[in-house]
């Protein structure tokens, strides 16, 4: 039975990926420092799958702790989620973001180098493309200068991995996420934003639940069908399954390059107003919102060309926007 390390495995995407790994018969060990989640996510995962993953409360910024973990753990692959991910916050705390998102990446890769480990899956983001010149975005689209420190950590992260693969005979896949949303069908795990939600869907569900007075729609003067910005909202379970497909590609040595990257989205772009309408339809809840000015750093539109991921990973999304929104609402009602 292959044993997979999932860093950030108690987070939103990490926890959903741990469930799918266990469903596929992998043994899972989680490293998480609980900086953006809570320990009861471990119990929820165990309730869903009936198997309790091994768990280490380690801060990957502490190099000696990372080293001692690998001294006592045999690992067949790593899925690396652990990182700070708030775009706005990253502009005020660049050094915290570079230390956490890149320092920890280097420590993990050094352990892989020293212990001859292989198979590294990296959590990347469509943010690396900035505002793409052509839509849908393909993997050949040029990586543009990042609009945020967060996006820059993903760009630099991919470069670090490419150099490590070239120098140390490693194999890695980066998955460039579009916008993950929704919750597991059991409604035992989901998105747990601490504080005021930065992302659209948690703000929508908290507004519908009466925790927020009103949703602010950031701009309706974009060059889009209804003036509001367009994104590719992918159900988090479909996203989790893409990680299993990528891991199997590496374990079965089907990768064609030592470092590959794939767009992981639905291929469908939805505007903010379309999301609001879809939410109201899926939940029969009227949403209180108002149009305000644009948010700094936002791009007009991004949605994925999924052809390469579909073919090479033999993976495609199965869940539609309405289902993802309905699951997000059910998860919110449970909070
Ligand atoms: C979506 C749309 C907003 C909130 C970022 C990162 C990406 C990933 C997901 C980490 C935009 C609009 C939002 C609100 C709004 N992060 N919006 N009112 O910015 O596309 O992507 O988060 O993995 O890497 O770049 O996601 O959910 O913040 O915004 O109108 O209260 O909703 O302007 O058009 P984004 P988002």
Image: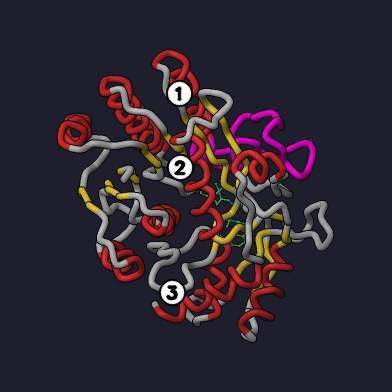
The residue at label 1 has a CB less than 8 Å from ligand 1: no
Do labels 2 and 1 touch, CB within 8 Å? Answer: no
Residue on which disc 3 sits: 187
Q: Is 132 inside the magenta-drawn segment?
A: yes
Q: Distance between the residues labelled 2 and 1?
A: 20 Å
The residue positioned 37% from the left and 44% from the top of the image is 82
The residue positioned 37% from the left and 28% from the top of the image is 118
Residue on which disc 1 sits: 160
- Give the secondary structure at mark 3: loop
Relative to the observer, which residue lies in front, 150 or 181?
Answer: 181
The residue positioned 29% from the left and 52% from the top of the image is 35
Residue 160: x and y in percent read: 45, 23
Q: Where's ligand 1: which quadrant? A: bottom right
Left or right of 83: which side holds 323? right
Q: Is residue 290 above or below residue 176?
A: below
- Give the secondary structure at mark 2: helix
Residue 64: x and y in percent read: 17, 30
Residue 91, can we see it? no
What's the magenta region?
A: 124-151
Total number of numbered discs in the rendering: 3
Residue on which disc 2 sits: 90
Q: Is 301 inside the magenta-drawn segment?
A: no
- Crowding around mark 2 (Cα neighbors within 10 Å: few <14, some 14 to 19, many 20+) is many
Mark with earlier residue (2, 3): 2
Q: Distance between the residues labelled 1 and 3?
A: 37 Å
Mark with earlier residue (2, 1): 2
Please name which of the two marks, 2 or 1, marks the residue nearer to the observer.
Answer: 1
Mark with earlier residue (1, 3): 1
Q: How far apart are marks 2 and 3 (CA)?
A: 30 Å
Do labels 1 and 3 touch, CB within 8 Å? Answer: no
Relative to the observer, which residue lies in front, 110 or 221?
Answer: 110
- Crowding around mark 1 (Cα neighbors within 10 Å: few <14, some 14 to 19, many 20+) is some
């Amino acid at each position: 039975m292959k044993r997979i390390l999932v860093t950030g495995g108690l987070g939103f995407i990490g926890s959903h990926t741990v469930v799918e790994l266990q469903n596929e018969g992998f043994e899972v060990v989680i490293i998480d420092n609980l900086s953006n989640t809570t320990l009861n996510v471990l119990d929820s995962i165990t309730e869903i799958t009936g198997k309790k993953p091994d768990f280490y409360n380690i801060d990957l910024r502490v190099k000696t702790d990372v080293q001692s973990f690998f001294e006592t753990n045999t690992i067949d692959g790593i899925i690396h989620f652990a990182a700070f991910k708030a775009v706005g916050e990253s502009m005020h705390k660049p050094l915290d973001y570079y230390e956490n998102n890149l320092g920890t990446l280097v420590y993990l890769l050094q352990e892989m180098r020293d212990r001859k480990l292989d198979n590294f899956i990296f959590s990347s983001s469509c943010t690396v493309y900035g505002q793409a010149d052509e839509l849908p975005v393909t993997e050949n689209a040029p990586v543009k200068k990042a609009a945020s420190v967060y996006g820059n950590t993903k760009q630099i992260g991919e470069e670090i991995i490419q150099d490590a693969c070239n120098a140390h005979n490693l194999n890695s896949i980066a998955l460039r996420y579009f916008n993950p949303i929704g919750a597991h069908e059991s409604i035992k795990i989901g998105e747990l934003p601490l504080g005021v939600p930065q992302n659209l869907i948690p703000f929508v569900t908290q507004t519908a639940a009466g925790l927020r007075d009103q949703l602010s729609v950031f701009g309706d003067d974009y060059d889009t069908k209804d003036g509001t910005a367009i994104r590719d909202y992918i159900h988090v379970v479909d996203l989790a399954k893409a990680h299993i497909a990528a891991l199997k590609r590496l374990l079965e040595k089907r990768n064609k390059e030592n470092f590959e990257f794939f767009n992981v989205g639905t291929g469908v772009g939805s505007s903010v107003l379309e999301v609001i309408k879809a939410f109201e339809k899926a939940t029969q809840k009227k949403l209180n919102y108002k149009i305000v000015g644009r948010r700094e750093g936002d791009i007009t539109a991004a949605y994925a060309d999924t052809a390469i991921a579909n073919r090479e990973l033999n993976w495609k999304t199965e869940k539609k926007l309405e289902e993802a929104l309905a699951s997000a609402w059910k998860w919110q009602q449970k909070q």
